[in-house]
Amino acid sequence: MPANQEATAAVDPAPQRRSLVGRRLAGLRRRGQRLVRARAWRLRLFGLLAVQAGIAAAIAWFVAYQFLDNSSPVFAPTTAVGIVAAAMGSRLRRTAELLAGVVLGLAVGDTLMPLFGIGPWQTGLVVVLAIIVAILLKGGGSLLTQAGGTAVLIATLEPPVRDLSVPRFVDAAVGGLIGLAVGLLLVPIHPQRTVQRLAEPVLDPGMAAMHDLAAALRARDLGEAQRSLRRLRDLDPRLTALEEGLSAAQEVVRLAPLRWRDRTSLAFYTEAVRHLERTLHSCRSIARRLTTALKDDEPIPAELPAAIDLLANGVQTLRSSIRAREGPHKAREQILMAVELVGRAQGEAGLDPTRPHTHRLGYSGLIVVGEFRTAAHDLLIASGLDAERAADLVRRAVDQDEQD
């Protein structure tokens, strides 16, 4: 009986259930922490836009009510908020599109509503025609949206009176100018801080995916390599947001007097971020080719995952040095050492000029060598070197490996 009791105790499922519940709770806690951090990041990035929008709407309403003799100002605050919302992009271009959309919506609405009256089908017809005209004029998304939205306002909020077009257009123009002034003059975004915050959700997960790729190569784990590639591909929307943030920051330092002193430093930031973006595209190509190499059962020398880890470390070191405004010497050393490791993975130099290396890599691995050197070249430019000097250092690293 005691032996049976001991056997039963050995397979008691209660501790296993508790362990499973604990792991699930820990997973939920980690996901909750990530969610909180993501929401906090969005608040830090876009919180100023809420303040700008509120100030712009209040000023636009006051100006339209007090100085334009409009007892129900609608278009002025609406357009002002629309301009502020265009902060992560080219404000001047979107301002023009928004104002053009208001004019188009007013023209179509005030032309058709007196003829057809007010009603559901009339509203739908006016919106369709306003957007069709915007499409024929090759308008962008802001023009299409504003034309349709203005047509709806004309069809539902106001009586079909033809002589109100000019005051409503003036309201919209004043609101657009006020939104532009608030966003660029009164409360402009901090250009460098904005670019840094937009780069965080791109570089951190991107380099984490590269480290995971290196681990997958060591274990020859195809599934994990595919997941790393998928995570790199999922960065596309964040890269788009980063591009728009760069455009917004450049516009602010060009037009906002409070930010003119940041022009030189932002120019360096912009150049660095653009080459870091190119590096991420090269990293995605590297991940794609190495995933194919695993599928095709190609050899993966140990130097290759080590080089990937070192390159990812170089990106993080470079990012830290840029933020701290320190010299990027350590980052450059890591990048060039990664190039040397890739050369060792490629193989020793051969005597036959038609076969310069005794290849240790397969077809996909050889393609990775070129992509890797391109990524290193872009990173060296991001560190502040010119293209010619960066290419020379990469060549020296390659030659050094061949001599070794």
Image (spheres, rainbow, N blue to C red):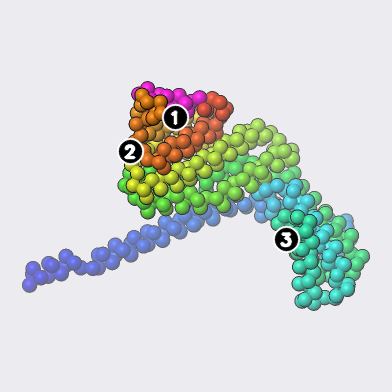
Residue at figure coordinates x 85%, y 71% from the top left: 113
Q: Nearer the viewer, mark 2 or mark 3?
A: 2
C-alpha span from label 2 to label 3: 54 Å
Viewer-nearest residue: 7 or 285: 285
Q: Position of residue 279 (x, y in %)?
A: 51, 39
Q: Residue 216: in sight, yes or no?
A: no
Residue at figure coordinates x 34%, y 36% from the top left: 360
- Label 2 residue SS: loop
Residue at figure coordinates x 45%, y 43% from the top left: 286
Is 54 placed above or below 152 here? above
Q: Which residues are magenta?
A: 392-404
> Residue 336 — which label?
1
Q: Looking at the rendering, in which quadrant would you find the N terminus?
A: bottom left
Is 395 placed above or below 64 here? above
Q: Position of residue 293 (x, y in %)?
A: 38, 45
- Label 3 residue SS: helix
Graded by Cα atoms within 10 Å as few (under 14), some (14 to 19) or many (20 or more), the crowding at tag 1 reads: many
**Sequence-wise first label, 2 or 1:** 2
> Residue 178 — which label?
none
Q: Which residue is mark 3?
A: 145
